Amino acid sequence: MASETPNLHVLIVGGGIGGLMLGIMLERAGIDYQILERSPEHRPLGSAISLNGTVLRLFEQLGLLEELYKISKFAGRLHVMKEDLETQGHLDLEHFEERYGYNSIVFGRPDLFKMLVSHIPEGKLLMDLAYSNCRQQVRLVHWRAHLGF
Ligand SMILES: Cc1cc2nc3c(=O)[nH]c(=O)nc-3n(C[C@H](O)[C@H](O)[C@H](O)COP(=O)(O)OP(=O)(O)OC[C@H]3O[C@@H](n4cnc5c(N)ncnc54)[C@H](O)[C@@H]3O)c2cc1C
């Protein structure tokens, strides 16, 4: 898509789920951006993640929902357990589609990162580079980053 805002350049600090999603949104909007991630590789928090209608609408708008469904399983019930796996309670999710328009889904975090990164063009995501500060000079912003943490 041709850029309608040629002078706008966005620096995204952090290539977590938020930074990668923002990158994809800017990509779709034709706005220039650069993502800096201080870790040399993605180290997803926890092993699985569950999402529902509050955010699946965004995946749909970005044309990513079918791809997300391919790496997901539908979740009908969420069990809350203690560390020793003793059940604390549960949450029924089966009415979610009727109420919110989308089922609740669960998937592996590494799979989500792989999927999101595959939609960021090469060179837009710089790993092992930590943002440190920025300085504004009239209409120019200078930013500094250093290698690693
Ligand atoms: C165990 C666990 C389970 C969870 N389960 C769920 C769930 O099931 N469903 C759900 O919706 N949410 C869940 N969450 C919450 C979800 O993980 C977070 O809301 C989400 O990861 C936040 O994403 P983010 O990109 O905003 O931040 P982060 O994932 O924290 O990413 C920030 C990134 O910025 C980088 N960074 C920081 N400083 C700099 C710098 N100076 N320069 C460059 N890079 C920098 C960091 O290295 C990091 O990669 C869970 C969280 C945890 C811990």
Image (tube, rainbow, N blue to C red):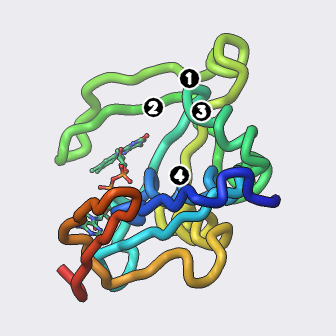
Where residue 46 sits in the image (x, y, percent)?
33, 58
Disc 3 CB within 8 Å of nearest ligand 1 atom: no
Q: Nearer the viewer, mark 3 or mark 1?
A: 3
In the rendered view, tell whether residue 63 sits above or below residue 70: above
Confirm or deny contact between disc 3 and disc 2 (CB under 8 A): yes
- Residue at 25% of width from left, 76% of height from top? 144
Comes first in the chain, label 3 or label 1: 1
Farthest-out residue, bottom? 147
Badge 1 local density, few (<14 within 10 Å), some, or many (20+)?
A: some
Name the disc covering residue 22, or none.
4
**CB at disc 1 and ligand 1 closer than 8 Å:** no
Foreground label between 3 and 2? 3
Badge 4 or badge 1: first in the primary sequence? 4
Label whose residue precedes the other's in the sequence (4 or 3): 4
Q: Which amino acid is tagged 2?
A: Leu
Considering depth in this image, is 60 or 148 the residue closer to the camera? 148
Q: Residue at x 74, y 40 (%)?
A: 60
149 or 53, which is in the foreground?
149
Determine which residue is flagged by label 2. 78
**SS for tag 3?**
loop
Quote the CA–CA distance across marks 4 and 1.
28 Å
The quarter holding residue 105 reads top right
Viewer-side label of 2, 4: 4
Contact between marks 3 and 1 (CB within 8 A): the answer is yes
Q: Mark 4 to mark 3: distance in Å?
A: 22 Å
